[in-house]
Amino acid sequence: MKELIEFIVKALVDDPSAIEVEVVEAEKSTTYKLRSAKSDIGKVIGKRGRTASAIRTIMTAVSARQGKKAVLEILE
């Protein structure tokens, strides 16, 4: 899942080398903390959060097969 998030986000931003995804495992959920360059935050979130919502929808579909809940946090 981490690789999937990195792949999607790196295709969107101007500085793909600044993308970092940290994985925090819990009992029933996994949290993915996404960091990018400050200039690329808007591209990751998208207009009215549509891009972030689309990424979260993909994550939900993949995590349903794994039986865990996936959460995406976009950090500055």
Image: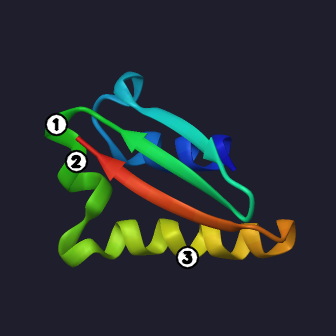
- The local secondary structure at tag 2 comes to helix
Residue at 48%, 59% in the rendered image: 72
Label 1 sits on what residue type? Lys
Real-space Cα separation, disc 1 to disc 3, in angstroms: 24 Å
Q: Nearer the viewer, residue 70 or 15?
A: 70
Q: Which residue is mark 2?
A: 41
Q: Is the Cβ of the residue at disc 1 closer than 8 Å to that at disc 2?
A: yes
Location of residue 23 (image quadrant): top right
Label 1 SS: helix
Q: Give the quarter of the figure containing the C terminus.
A: top left
Distance (Cα) linking label 1 and label 2 = 5 Å
Q: Vertically, is 37 above or below 59? A: above
Q: Which mark is residue 38?
A: 1
Distance from Cα at disc 2 to Cα at disc 3: 19 Å
Residue 40 location (% of width, % of height):
22, 42
Q: From the viewer's perspective, is residue 67 above or below residue 27? A: below
